[in-house]
Amino acid sequence: MVNRPRRTGRQVMPTDQAPEGALTKDAKPILSFAPRRRGKPPAHLADLDFEQRQKVLVDAGLPKFRADQLSRHYFQRHIADPAQMPDLPKSMVDQVEQSLMPPLIKKVHTLETDDGKTLKHLWELFDGSRVESVLMRYPSRTTLCISSQAGCGMACPFCATGQMGLTRNLSTAEIIEQVRMAALACENGDLAGGPTRLSNIVFMGMGEPLANYRAIINSLQRMIEEPPHGFGLSARNITVSTVGLVPAIDKLADLGYPVTLAVSLHAPDDELRDELIPINSRWKVGELLDAARRYFVKTGRRVSIEYALIKDMNDHPWRAQLLADELNKRGHGWAHVNPIPLNPTPGSIWTASTSRAQNEFVETLRNAGIVTTIRDTRGSDIDGACGQLATSVAKEEESSDE
């Protein structure tokens, strides 16, 4: 039997106040799975498996073997413009672009920090929707954080993207284009330190990945499969995050891909998590952790527990102990906790925990036998939190139009 920790320490509960500048008319966004926009982007090579690419070419009156050629240009050489493919006849360029390789994203803005080792990009999609990605160079890896939706319907009050609401799901190709552009940036030496290779992908940008399940699964296939089918990245270097869509976690586990599951928990008790993570009203903490444990059992991949530390809200030592108890009663060694110093949005009521509170929280977890690593937060000085760049650029554009 687990002894419940004493609940001591100053407690601030969430309010309905949204961060200043949030792109919403309501004080508190509502949990939603229904996108505001339903228009589909143009069909693209990256949306299709290899056989489907061949069929599109044949239907367009083009040779079937061009599917291999185009796919190798895209996934190995990271070229998306048919006009830049020297072995493609000029007479085919327009037809190939129209049928398989239409432009999908364009760069709106780029911010640089960490002495050039972090680049944050804002992309505009075919319908004017905007998403963000972050490319980060570390000593032993280069990681890309990508978006899976324009906006987000999960309505988490401390998240800039959550305050936007859900605009729409991204297509498989729109997700994959973020990867291709990052791979190209690595090759071109856009990051400090010269050319490098993109090695890691994390679905931790804008949106709830598992709410766009089919596109995420297709994207994983394109990332993992060897050329000409995909990029040939290691599945073990890919992380998929979720705030807690339990049925989708089980579906992902059944596929057997050895990708890492990251659970954005942020509170170990239902009382607080109901307020911080509205989807907790459907699947409670216990149900979510049970699903995370099942994921570990089926895949053998240790689950990451993400925990944004918010001052006087969820950073109490008793909550750290409660989190440790909840994890330990489901076994040992199956979860790894990543406390994350909150990157607050401008004007927000939410702020990061003090160093003292953070250290005590981490020490409590480690003393309980929980492997704990404080997440390195990149880009705090360049609108680092998801949605901040899109919001700030939108406000600048509105001001210039007045």
Image: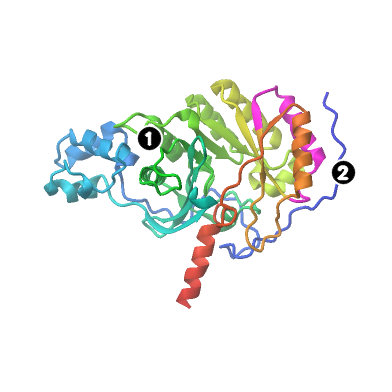
**For residue 229, which quarter of the picture?**
top left
Q: Give the range drawn in magenta.
A: 311-336
Q: Quadrant of the N terminus?
A: top right
* Residue sitting farthest toward the bottom: 402
The amino acid sitting under disc 2 is: Thr
Confirm whether the magenta stretch covers residue 56: no
Q: Which residue is drawn at 70% across and 24% down?
A: 330
Q: Which of 164 and 192 is in front in this view?
A: 192
Residue 241 seen = yes
Residue identified by numbered label 2: 8
Residue 247: x %, y % from top left = 57, 33
Per the model, the C-alpha gap separating discs 1 and 2 is: 49 Å
As drawn, 282 above or below 335: below
Confirm whether the magenta stretch covers residue 313: yes
Q: Residue 222 carries which label?
A: 1
Q: Is residue 190 left or right of residue 33?
A: left
Residue 186: x %, y % from top left = 40, 43
Q: Residue at x 36, y 42 (%)?
A: 187
As drawn, 15 above or below 81: below
For label 1, the crowd category at 10 Å Cα-Cα, with few meaning under 14, some 14 to 19 and many 20 or more, is many
Q: Nearer the viewer, residue 248 or 80?
A: 80
Q: Is residue 213 left or right of residue 88?
A: right
For label 2, the crowd category at 10 Å Cα-Cα, with few meaning under 14, some 14 to 19 and many 20 or more, is few
Number of marks present in the image shown? 2
As drawn, 390 above or below 318: below
The amino acid sitting under disc 1 is: Arg
Q: Which mark is residue 244?
A: none
